[in-house]
Image (cartoon, rainbow, N blue to C red):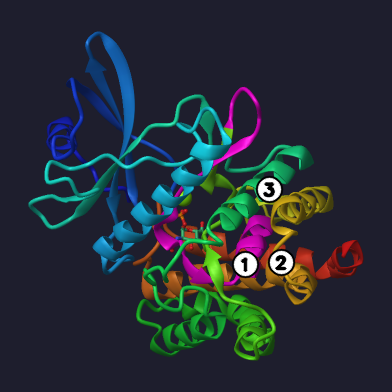
């Protein structure tokens, strides 16, 4: 469940940051599965302005300061790039506000780490993408983001070690199966078989990386379609958000997660599995869009693995939902019992749909 906060508490939390004017209200915002986000409304000399206030989930991000160091570096780097290229920079990257000590984050008395951003107006995140054109723009936007970071100097902090180490995710699932700490294993025989019968493929991308055929890059690692804002007026994918997992990774996991989240016409926790599947026209949109921006720097070996990456990450995220279900819903926020199991089932249905269309996906290459 999202953490409940009173208006008085939100006002105090907002008060940790340098924001002019009077606090009016703070309301829960967005659909993230991990952090808590509020939209703040301030009155500044008679004009209402919005900010985003966010609590970093320290159960997930053990070192929030390392997260904020990355976010600051990444947004600063991107700002430098777009200042040169565009007249208007405000909506094209997240902008952090300063706390009173000048740092881009602040800790509340309970030890939670908070940050605040300029709120990007007249743009929104889509849970389900609406058209192949929109898919094109989303993938183009995420590809552009990777491109902007190609020349960021120095290595970023690994905010969650082994985040996309699929074999380790399998091992975590196996441990959860063995422990069966909540007595839920009896409900998921089909789902555990589904993963275990595909176990051999799970290390494929990491192996290619270890052999030196696909490179480590700076990647976003959580390129869910709803982690990029689409401008209401132009329809352009203008701003990548949710930067907590930007760190060294494989470009393929980023493409894969766009396919997982952007080609399925149903919600991530849809109960009617007949609605779940990969729309091929949406895949084409994503593929073309990604090629348009990332095509210039991706290697041939990476391009060849694009279709497989979609299957792999969908399987990986499905097994993370399954693991969390078995562990008693301790990682992802849930609003109802079994929500993690429902999420797992949609992911596995999607894996099957991707498998069935693999030939077509390969032919696009
Ligand atoms: C989480 O925070 P959000 O909702 O953008 C998760 C992703 C999962 C996603 C599944 C840090 O992302 O890895 O793919 O849920 N983020 C983290 O919806 O674990
Ligand atoms: Mg998000």
Which numbered disc covers residue 298?
Answer: 2
* Residue 201, quarter of the rendered image: bottom right
| Mark 2 nearby-residue class (10 Å; few <14, some 14–19, many ≥20) | some
The residue that label 3 is drawn on is 140
Is 232 inside the magenta-drawn segment? yes
Q: Earlier in the sequence, mark 1 or mark 3?
A: 3
- Residue at left 44%, top 69%? 325
Camera-near label (1 vs 2) is 2
Pick whichever, 108 or 343, lies toward us.
Answer: 108
Q: In the rendered view, does 213 fall on the left or right side of 219?
A: right
Q: Earlier in the sequence, mark 3 or mark 2?
A: 3
Which-is-in-front pick, marks 3 and 2?
2
Mark 3 and mark 2: Cα distance apart in space: 13 Å
Residue found at the far front of this picture: 84
State the image coordinates of residue 138 (x, y, percent, origin top left).
65, 45
Disc 1 secondary structure class: helix
Q: Tell how many labels.
A: 3
Q: Which circle marks residue 39 in the picture?
A: none
Mark 1 and mark 3: span between their CA atoms? 13 Å
Residue 23 x %, y %: 19, 23
In the picture, measured across the screen, residue 355 lies left or right of residue 159, that is right
Q: Residues within 10 Å of mark 3 (few under 14, many from 20)?
A: many
Residue 349 x %, y %:
70, 64
- Residue plotted at (92% across, 66% down): 363
Q: Residue 251, which numbered label?
A: 1
Above or below, comparing residue 285 to residue 49 in the picture: below
Tell me the SS state at disc 2.
loop
Per the rendered image, the range of residues in magenta is: 231-260
Write down the quadrant of residue 232 in the picture: top right
Mark 1–mark 2 Cα distance, whole angstroms, equals 8 Å
Label 1 CB-ligand 1 distance < 8 A: no
């Amino acid at each position: 469940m999202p953490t409940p906060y009173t208006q008085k508490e939100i006002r105090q939390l907002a008060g940790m940051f340098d924001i002019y004017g009077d606090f009016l209200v703070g309301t829960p915002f967005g659909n993230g599965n991990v952090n808590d986000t509020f939209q703040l409304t301030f009155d500044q000399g008679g004009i209402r302005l919005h900010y985003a206030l966010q609590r970093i989930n320290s159960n997930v991000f053990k070192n929030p300061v390392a997260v904020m160091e990355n976010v600051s570096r990444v947004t600063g780097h991107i700002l430098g790039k777009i200042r040169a290229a565009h007249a208007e920079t405000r909506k094209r990257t997240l902008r952090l506000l300063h706390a009173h000590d000048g740092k881009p984050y602040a800790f509340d008395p309970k030890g939670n780490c908070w940050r605040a951003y300029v709120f990007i107006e007249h743009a929104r995140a889509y849970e389900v993408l609406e058209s192949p054109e929109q898919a094109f723009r989303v993938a183009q936007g995420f590809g552009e983001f990777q491109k902007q970071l190609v020349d960021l100097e120095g290595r970023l902090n690994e905010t969650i070690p082994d985040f996309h180490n699929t074999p380790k995710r399998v091992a975590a699932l196996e441990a959860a199966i063995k422990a069966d700490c909540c007595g839920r294993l009896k409900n998921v025989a089909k789902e555990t078989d589904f993963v275990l019968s595909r176990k051999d493929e799970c290390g494929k991308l990491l192996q290619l990386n270890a052999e030196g055929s696909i490179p480590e890059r700076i990647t976003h690692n959580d390129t869910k379609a709803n982690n990029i804002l689409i401008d209401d007026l132009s329809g352009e994918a203008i701003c990548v958000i949710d930067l907590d997992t930007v760190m060294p990774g494989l470009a393929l996991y980023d493409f894969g997660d766009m396919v997982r989240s952007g080609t399925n016409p149903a919600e991530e926790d849809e109960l009617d599995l007949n609605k779940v599947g990969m729309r091929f026209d949406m895949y084409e949109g994503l593929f073309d869009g990604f090629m348009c921006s990332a095509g210039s720097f991706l290697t041939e070996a990476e391009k060849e693995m694009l279709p497989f990456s979609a299957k792999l990450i969908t399987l990986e995220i499905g097994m993370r939902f399954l693991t969390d279900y078995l562990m008693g819903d301790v990682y992802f926020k849930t609003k109802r019992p079994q929500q993690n199991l429902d999420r797992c089932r949609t992911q596995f249905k999607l894996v099957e749909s991707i498998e069935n269309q693999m030939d077509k996906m390969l032919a696009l290459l």
